[in-house]
Amino acid sequence: GDINTDAMAGATISTNAALSAINIARQYYFVELAGGTLNYPLSDEVLQQLFPNASSWETLSVAAPNVAGAWRGDDGTYVIIGQGSGMGSKPVTVAVAMDANGVILGIWCDTSGETEGLGDVVGQDNSFLSEFVNQNNTDGIDTVGGTTVTKDAIVDAVNAALAALPLAKEA
């Protein structure tokens, strides 16, 4: 799991930056050097939401930077979990449902490690998340606002998922 510790008073931003760097290094080591996969646990309920037309799905082994899991539905769609670094000590995790051409069909976010009342609610902001649907890239996604770091982390996570699609299709 991620390294998680309480930030020291007066050094919250630098402490969180250091923890984020440690977690990225841990993930890089695990995925790139040790050949593992980081399987972020998605509930069956979330998978059913992301695979509305599939009757079943299989777990795929996809080793790519900032990717924490992948599935292929029997309807030819994919769900790939990307991760980005936000303000919190744990990564922002985004499950991206997409078709075989990389067109985003839906998104589920875990921003629970972000600043309470600000960044943590971005993952449930349907007006922001809907900007990704029916797109095959993140160009033009509006990340400006009071939660820019969390929104940027979501964009980074979506980009990681999109970049991993060719690997998922080969798995």
Image (tube, rainbow, N blue to C red):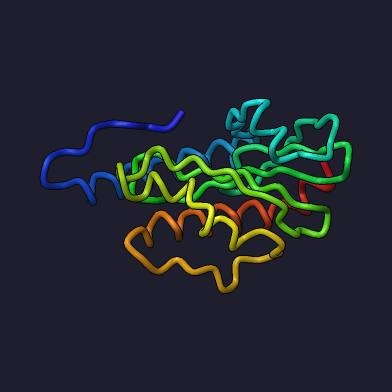
Give the residue at x 61% y 54%: 160
Residue 44 position, x and y percent, is 68, 26
Give the residue at x 43% y 51%: 122
Left or right: residue 128 versus residue 69 is: left
Asked if residue 156 shows in the view, the reply is no
Image quarter (top left, top right, bottom left or bottom right) of the C terminus? top right
Asked if residue 141 shows in the view, the reply is yes
Judge whether 144 appears above or below 117 on screen: below
Which residue is situated farthest in the front direction here? Answer: 127
Residue 81 position, x and y percent, is 62, 43
Give the quarter of the image for residue 162. Answer: bottom right
Give the residue at x 36% y 49%: 119
Residue 165 position, x and y percent, is 74, 52
Residue 139 position, x and y percent, is 59, 72
Left or right: residue 60 versus residue 14 is: right
Judge whether 120 appears above or below 159 on screen: above
